Image: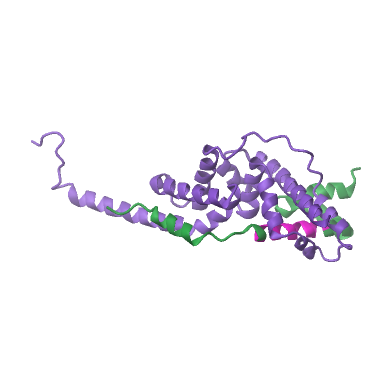
Chain colours: A purple, B green
Amino acid sequence: MVPAGTVVHVDAEPEEAQRLATEARDRVRFEEDALALSDQVYRVARHLANSREDADELMQETYARAFRSWRSFQPGTNMRAWLLRILTNLNIDRGRRQQRAPQMQPLEANDYFLYDRLAENGDGITDEDRVVERLSQDDIVTALSAVPHDFRDVVVLVDLGDFSYADAAQILDIPVGTVMSRLHRGRRILKRELAESALEEAT
Amino acid sequence: MKDPCAHCEEMMQPYLDHVLTDEEMAAAEAHLADCEPCRRRYRFEESLRVYVRKAATEQMPAELRQKLAALRIPLE
């Protein structure tokens, strides 16, 4: 008779040891896989966050949480999307968003607005591939950060992170139709911002 | 009938995202083959996307990489 609370070692040990060894191996593999994705996660995180400092903190919080809750990751599913789901949730929890509901935006003109604006300022466009070079890297980064979060999240996930509409919908927990409409508007807002900075430089 | 260039503009985002149906894709391509201004604008949009992605890509700082690796839970 074994008193309650006594840990029985003798018979359970080999099985338990085996289980622990398997778990340790799975966990190490999970951590290695997650770390191998960190460059790709950062590329997206950098622009979901408002600054490099925010992105840095957000990455550390995300990985700390991922390592703690590694058991909830289903092997064989998209780990990059899983990590970004954690990251976007943390980003919202931290109150980095000014507001969750899409805010009123001034009319963002049409899809050709930026092209037309750049074409007006140039001496006529002869090569479309070179027109974009009238925008600086700073212009792009600043314009992206000026896009309101709800729209920016989708643009960043799809256009910088190469996620499908469906993956972006799952990461942000919104319907695919919402992803599509926010993506469309977000890209227009981005172009409006770019047109404004291009115009400022021209004057 | 709707202005074909206005319709073409509406199709641009889904066209470049490869989410049009075959029929819509064929209609867009037929218009693009005949309309140079729309063709130029599509080409601009495509290079803009590539350029934005390139301009926005920042390397992860080396210190952050080390900090992340240090967050691993030690084996007991």
Magenta stretch secondary structure, dominant: helix
Q: Relative to residue B28, is residue A181 drawn left or right? A: left
Residue A119 is drawn in which quadrant?
bottom right
Residue A155's spot in the image, x, y percent?
66, 48
Q: Nearer the viewer, residue B23 or A167?
A: A167
Q: Magenta stretch: residue B72 in it?
A: no
Task: Give the quadrant of the N terminus of chain B.
Answer: top right
In the orientation shown, which residue stands out farthest toward the front? A203
Taking the spot 30% from the left edge, 54% from the top edge, the residue there is B75
Q: Relative to residue A13, is residue B24 drawn left or right? A: right
Taking the spot 72% from the left edge, 45% from the top edge, the residue there is A184
Task: Tell me if I can see residue B21 in this picture.
Answer: no
Q: Nearer the viewer, residue A21 or B54?
A: B54
Residue B65's spot in the image, x, y percent?
46, 59
Taking the spot 48% from the left edge, 57% from the top edge, the residue there is B64
Residue B40 is drawn in which quadrant?
bottom right
Q: Which residues are magenta?
A: B41-54
Q: Nearer the viewer, residue A119 or A51?
A: A51
Q: Magenta stretch: residue B49 in it?
A: yes
Residue A71's spot in the image, x, y percent?
39, 46
In the orientation shown, which residue stands out farthest toward the left? A1
Task: Tell me if I can see residue A22 in this picture.
Answer: yes
Q: Nearer the viewer, residue B50 or B18?
A: B50
Taking the spot 18% from the left edge, 47% from the top edge, the residue there is A12
Total number of numbered labels? 0
Residue B8's spot in the image, x, y percent?
83, 50
